[in-house]
């Protein structure tokens, strides 16, 4: 089989949704996610428009094919600069697109009637986690993001021919072995 005949050879869109959950309510969280995707839908098709695709994103599954990883999805709560550096490193070493999905979480997203809010979050204002979701290309450069201190959708073009190149030093099959 020729790599140019693979489904992603011509290119596609990749996207990341950054949103706070509806606290302790999975169904309302998924409804919120669907509404956010519908509201911010990019002009061209992108993955993640159905509940099942969104759930796959949240579980951090990576899309794989006979030609290697097409895009690597990394969900996290981390919110510091090392997170951004790690996403760039993984993209460059693996010669793949990386979608880093962070959870943006504002103090107002925690219901006031929960006892621990007053005990542990008293005096805290603003974002508990500002997010920092990103899309990084195979050269380790930002294609979109970081998305900070707001909910939203990042999207970018991803052409398969951009993944062609050396895998640098990372050999997950065992270069340490």
Image (cartoon, rainbow, N blue to C red):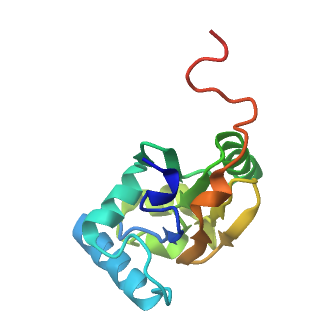
- Residue at image location 54% in from the left, 71% down from the top: 106
Image-based side of 149 in relation to 117, left or right = right
Image-based side of 14 in relation to 7, left or right = right
Q: Position of residue 110 (x, y in %)?
A: 43, 68
Q: 4 or 51, which lies in front?
A: 4
- Residue at image location 63% in from the left, 72% down from the top: 125
Q: Is residue 22 above or below residue 61?
A: below
Query: Can residue 73 be seen at all in this image of the molecule?
Result: no
Quarter of the image where one finds residue 28: bottom left
Q: Position of residue 64 (x, y in %)?
A: 42, 46
Furthest-top residue in view?
177
Q: Position of residue 8 (x, y in %)?
A: 48, 62
Q: Is residue 60 above or below residue 99?
A: above
* Image quadrant in which the C terminus is located: top right
Q: 119 or 81, which lies in front?
A: 81
Q: 66 or 156, which lies in front?
A: 66
- Residue at image location 33% in from the left, 79% down from the top: 34
Query: Can residue 150 be seen at all in this image of the molecule?
Result: yes
Q: Is residue 94 above or below residue 172?
A: below
Q: 53 or 95, which lies in front?
A: 95
Q: Position of residue 133 (x, y in %)?
A: 61, 64
Q: How many marks?
A: 0
Furthest-left residue in view?
27
Q: Is residue 166 above or below residue 172?
A: below
- Residue at image location 28% in from the left, 78% down from the top: 31
């Amino acid at each position: 089989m020729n790599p140019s005949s693979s489904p992603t050879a011509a290119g596609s869109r990749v996207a990341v949704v950054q949103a706070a959950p509806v606290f302790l309510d999975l169904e309302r969280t998924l409804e919120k996610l669907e509404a956010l995707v519908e509201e911010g839908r990019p002009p061209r098709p992108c993955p993640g428009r159905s509940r099942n695709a969104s759930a796959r994103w949240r579980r951090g599954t990576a899309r794989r094919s006979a030609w290697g990883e097409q895009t690597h999805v990394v969900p996290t709560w981390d919110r510091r600069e090392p997170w951004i550096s790690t996403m760039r490193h993984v993209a460059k070493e693996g010669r793949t697109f990386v979608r880093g999905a962070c959870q943006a979480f504002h103090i107002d997203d925690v219901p006031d009637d929960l006892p621990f809010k007053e005990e542990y979050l008293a005096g805290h204002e603003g974002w508990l986690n500002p997010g920092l979701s990103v899309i990084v290309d195979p050269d380790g450069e930002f294609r979109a993001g970081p998305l900070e201190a707001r909910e939203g959708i990042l999207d970018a073009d991803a052409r398969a021919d951009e993944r062609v190149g050396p895998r640098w030093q990372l050999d997950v099959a065992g270069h340490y072995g």
